[in-house]
Image (cartoon, helix red, strand yellow):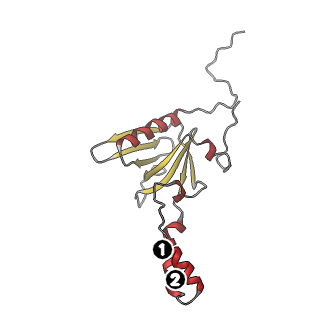
Amino acid sequence: MKVPLNPYNDSLIPANYNFEGLVERRCLLKNFKEPNISKWKKYWVAICEHLLFFHKQRSFLITLPMRLSRQTSLKKNDNISIAQSKLSNMNITLTETDRLYYRQNPSKCQSITDWLIVLSQTKNRNEIQLSDLTRGSMYKFKFENAAIANIWFQRLKEATLFKQTNGQLSENLIALD
C-alpha cells in the first residue's frame, strides 16, 4: 500500500510531484471576504496527489545585480573589486520561467480536494478559477497561452477528484454475510 505523503517532509515531496510549472495567481476571495489588495503574483506551483505547493521567488536573485554593482563602486582599488567586477559582468541567464528562480521549500501547501475549477479562455486571457466553496476561498491562475492553460486544467481537475484511501473501506459497500 502506498504511504500517504506528509506535506512538511521536504525530501519526499519534490520527488513525487505529478506536475509543476510557472503560474500567476490572484486572490479573489479569502474566508468569504474580498482582500484589500489583489494583485497578480508569480509562483512556481507543483501538484502532488491532491496538494498544491506554492514556491515563492528567491529574494536574493532579484537584488543580486544591484548588490554587486554597489560593492564594486565602493571598493575601486582593492583586489576584491576586480573579482566583484568580474561577477557583475557575468551574464545571469536565470529567468522567471526557470525552477531555480524560486525557493526550494514551498511557502504554502493547499489541498484542493473537492474544489470547483472553471477554465475561462478568451482572445487575450487564459485563466483558471479555483473555488473552495466550504471555506470561501477563490483564486485565479493566469497562463501565457491556451495550450498551457488546458494542460493545467486537466491536472488540476485530476487533483480535485483525488481521494485519499488510507486502507479505509468505503461506506457504500454492502456486507454479504
Count every numbered label the image shows and give the total: 2
The quadrant the C terminus occupies is top right
x then y, percent, for residue 77: 55, 90
Residue drawn at point x = 41 percent, y = 48 percent: 140
- SS assignment at label 2: helix
Q: Residue furthest top?
A: 177
The vertical placement of 110 against 171, above or below, is below
Tell me which corner region of the image, top left, top right, bottom left or bottom right, holds residue 16. top right
Q: Residue at x 45, y 38 (%)?
A: 116
Q: Amino acid at mark 2?
A: Thr
Residue name at image x 51 percent, y 71 percent:
64
Residue 144 percent across, percent down from the top left: 37, 49
Q: Which mark is residue 89?
A: 1
Cα separation, mark 2 vs mark 1, equals: 11 Å
Q: Nearer the viewer, residue 131 or 166?
A: 166
Q: Give left or right: position of 3 versus 126.
A: right
Q: Residue at x 54, y 37 (%)?
A: 113
Q: Position of residue 151 (x, y in %)?
A: 43, 38
Q: Residue furthest left?
A: 123
Mark 2 surroundings within 10 Å by alpha-carbon count, few (fewer than 14), some (14 through 19), many (20 or more): many
Query: Mark 2 or mark 1: which comes first in sequence?
Result: 2
Q: In front of the other: label 2 or label 1?
A: 1
At label 1, the amino acid type is Asn
Q: Residues within 10 Å of mark 1 (few under 14, many from 20)?
A: few
Badge 1 element? helix
- Name the residue furthest bottom: 77
47 left or right of 143 in image: right
Looking at the image, which is closer to me, 94 or 40? 94
Q: Which mark is residue 72?
A: 2
Residue 39 % position (x, y) = 40, 59
* Quarter placement of the N terminus: top right
